[in-house]
Amino acid sequence: METLASRPTLQTDRIKLPLTYDTALMMEEIRALNFRDFIYYNVCMLTHPFRKNKDEEILDAADGSWAEWRDSGFLKDSPYMLSIVNEFRQHCTITLVRLLRLEAGAVIREHTDPTLGLHIQKSVIRLTIPIQVEKGVDFFLNGTIVPMLPGECWYLRLTDPHQIVNGSQSERINMTIDMVPNEWVRKLILG
C-alpha cells in the first residue's frame, strides 16, 4: 500500500516512471537511420528549434521553451519513436528530443545541467529512455548509480551532479525527451 512517505517529492533526484517502451523496435529504427561511425559521443537531433513563425533554425537551444520545435527527418522516418514523442505531445509541450550514443569505454565527466529540474521555475525537464545499455554502463547521479534498464522511462534531476561511465564493450544509446512542465507532467512524475 502506498503511503505519503513512499510518494516521490521534489527532493527525490530520480524517479522511474510507470512507462515502458519496446527497445527492439527502437533499435530497428535506429539501424534503419544508418548512422555513420562516430568517436566517443554522438547526438542525433530528432527535433530542431526554429524562431517562431520563421524558417530560421536556432543553433543554441539550451532552454528552448520559447522556440517552435519541428521534427527532423530522422524522427519522421521512425514511426515508433515518433509515436512515443506524440504520446507526450498530447499532454505537454515537447522541446528537444535526441538520441545520445556513447562509445564503449567512454566517460562523460561529472557535470550539472542548470535548467533541467522540475524544482526550478520556468525550467525544461528531461525524461530518459535507455535503449541499448549493457552491463558495465553506469549512470551516476549524486555519486550513486541509477539502475536504468532498457525500455524504462526515468525522470532525473539533472541540476544535480551526474556522470556516465561506459565500461561495456558496446555503445550506449538513450533517447531523451525534454518538455515544459505542466500539471500533467508533475502528476506523471510525482504521482
Image (cartoon, grey):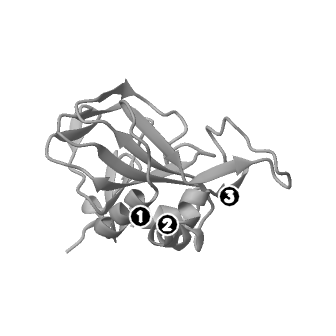
Amino acid under label 2?
A: Ser
**Residue located 34% across and 61% down the image:** 27
**Residue located 42% across and 61% down the image:** 32
Residue 175: x and y, percent? 42, 53
Residues at circles 1 and 2 in contact by the CB criterion of under 8 Å:
yes
Q: Mark 1 highlights which residue?
A: 29
Q: Label 1: how many residues lie within 10 Å, few (<14), some (14-19) or many (20+)?
A: some
Q: Total number of numbered labels?
A: 3
Q: Quadrant of residue 191?
A: bottom left
| Cα gap from disc 2 to disc 3, whole angstroms | 14 Å
**Residue located 50% across and 46% down the image:** 44
Residue 3: x and y, percent? 25, 68
Q: Is residue 103 above or below residue 189?
A: above
Q: Mark 3 highlights which residue?
A: 70
Q: Looking at the image, which residue sits at the far left?
A: 135
First in sequence: mark 1 vs mark 2: 1
Looking at the image, residue 51 sits to the left or right of residue 119; the answer is right
Q: Mark 2 highlights which residue?
A: 78
Observer-nearest of 182 and 129: 129
Q: Describe the element under mark 3 as helix, strand or loop.
A: strand
Q: Quadrant of the N terminus?
A: bottom left
